[in-house]
Image (cartoon, grey):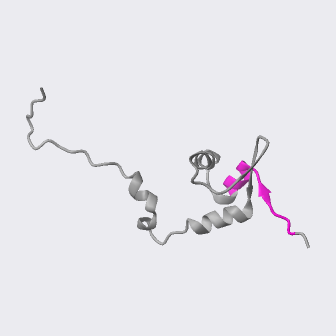
Amino acid sequence: MTIKMARLTVREASKYLGLAVSTLNQMRGAGNGPRFLKLGGKILYDTRHLDQWMDDNTRTSTSDDPQARSRRRPRRRRSRHAFDVIS
């Protein structure tokens, strides 16, 4: 018995995931997107990998995301005195 895998193009995979094509491309470049195949110059996504990636990224709240903490902007330090002179 042969199991046929569904392989999707970047455009098809972005629709499958509900993401913009550019978002999926950026995630692939950064290494934080779903697994993919590169055959020659063509990028393909296996639907099993897409489903697994979605399962792995399921959260119960926004605070569950470990990457959210690293994406926060650092707080700017304010001067204690309004008229500090910088020399």
Residue 65 in percent (x, y) is at: 46, 63
- Direction from residue 19 to residue 41 in the image, left or right: right
Determine whether 76 is above or below 13 in the image.
Answer: above
Q: Is residue 9 magenta?
A: yes
As rendered, which of 73 and 30 lies closer to the eye? 30
Residue depicted at x 67% and y 53%: 14
Q: Is residue 86 magenta?
A: no
Residue depicted at x 67% and y 66%: 51
- Direction from residue 32 to residue 86 in the image, left or right: left
Q: Which residues are drawn in magenta?
A: 3-15
Q: Quadrant of residue 33?
A: bottom right
Residue 84 in percent (x, y) is at: 9, 34
- Direction from residue 53 to residue 45 in the image, left or right: right
Residue 67 in percent (x, y) is at: 45, 58
As rendered, which of 36 and 80 lies closer to the eye? 36
Residue depicted at x 41% and y 52%: 71
Residue depicted at x 37% and y 52%: 72
Q: Quadrant of the C terminus?
A: top left
- Direction from residue 72 to residue 13 in the image, left or right: right
Q: Quadrant of residue 80?
A: top left
